[in-house]
Image (tube, rainbow, N blue to C red):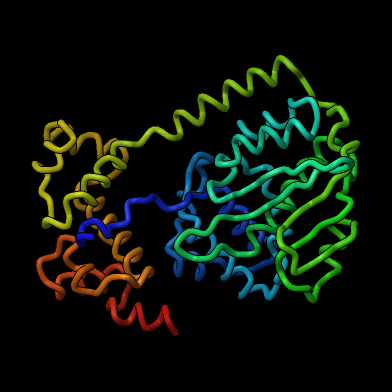
Amino acid sequence: MTLQAKVMDEKSIKTPSSWVRAIIDTLVARQVDTQPILEKLKIELGALGDRDGEVDQDLVSALWDEAVAVTGDQNIGFDVGRNILALLNPVIAYSLMSCSNLRSSCDRLLRYQDIVAEGLNFSVRETEQSYHLIFDILPDRRAPSSQAIKSAIAAFLAFIRWVTQTPICPTSATFKEALPQALETYEELLSCSLSFEAEENCLTFSKQDLLEPLPTADTDLSEIHEQQLQAYVVKRNEPTFSDQVKRAFKDLLPSGEPNQELIANRLNVSVSTLKRRLKSEELTYNTLLDATRHELALRHLQQQKLSLTEITYLLGFSQSSAFTRAFRRWQGESPSQYLANSNA
């Protein structure tokens, strides 16, 4: 395998920025000073207002860790999940309400779970008397936080209780995690038999509960919502112009820093069009190139599969010293220090 073939092309798993907003709002409600956390993780509050906005799942995992550390609450995810509904994309929320019953809502959630979060791995298993709803989070460059599972479960329960206007509860619940100290938090939320150190995170419901007609069911409206979801997914999956430029950067950087003429030719546009279209996304060529290098540097260092010399080459730097200077500007420490701190 050539060195260039080692470049990781897959996109990071994305999470709607509304989840970040919900975590921050929960901390603020607990009178936590969130500014140090925002500065540490380089989160800009102003960028969280867009319901279509997305952030890397790894950033959310880091935020969960900070939330647990600052509050000492190992179950803060449950609290966040209870408060997320008002912040979720209304396209998916309303579409689940118009389904005929909760079983149909689960089917729709299964099809469109990427809208809730790309890393969400939701599935349904049917047995003779029950439906078993399995919740998991796919790993990205770092393992996902257990708080993400708790928030997803709490959000699901909040939704079904709100839409049915009943305190519906599962008949049993299992969790992968070890037996927690604050068991009463689980008992209060779920009101069912609990098992821990299980093979899956699962809520089991009676078929009767999930097949009960929803008071908000509307067949005609449900068909419209299905069409809206399909259109939303198509639009969401269309790469932006900056995505195309970043892809070109990643392909060409191992051959040296690409200039604007080279990238423009690669995308079959003029240099002026390249600048104009990036400006329409509030970006410049140099800032996007710098951000792409930063992203790739962190990815390669976290994977710990390449030497610093190889990473220098893949990022298009002519000398290791140039890479080190850039990395200090990005992270406030050298690549070697970053690796040492990551392994500490």
Could you say where residue 178 lies in the image, as x and y percent from the top left?
A: 74, 73
The number of numbered discs placed on residues in the rendered structure image is: 0
> Position of 184 compared to 10: left or right?
right
Could you say where residue 330 lies in the image, as x and y percent from the top left?
A: 29, 67
Could you say where residue 256 lies in the image, as x and y percent from the top left?
A: 11, 57
> Position of 125 compared to 116: left or right?
right
Between residue 26 and residue 260, name the one nearer to us: 260
> Position of 250 compared to 27: left or right?
left
Hey, which quadrant is residue 219 in on the image?
top right
Q: Is residue 25 above or below residue 310?
A: above
Between residue 253 and residue 284, name the one nearer to us: 253
Could you say where residue 20 lies in the image, as x and y percent from the top left?
A: 56, 55
Q: Is residue 230 above or below residue 301?
A: above
Q: Is residue 54 above or below residue 240?
A: below
- Quadrant for the C terminus in the image: bottom left
Residue that sits furthest to the top in the current view = 220
> Which residue is painted at 69% across and 21% down in the image?
222
> Which residue is painted at 87% across and 40% down in the image?
128
- Quadrant for the N terminus in the image: bottom left
> Which residue is painted at 22% across and 53% down in the image?
289
> Position of 262 compared to 79: left or right?
left
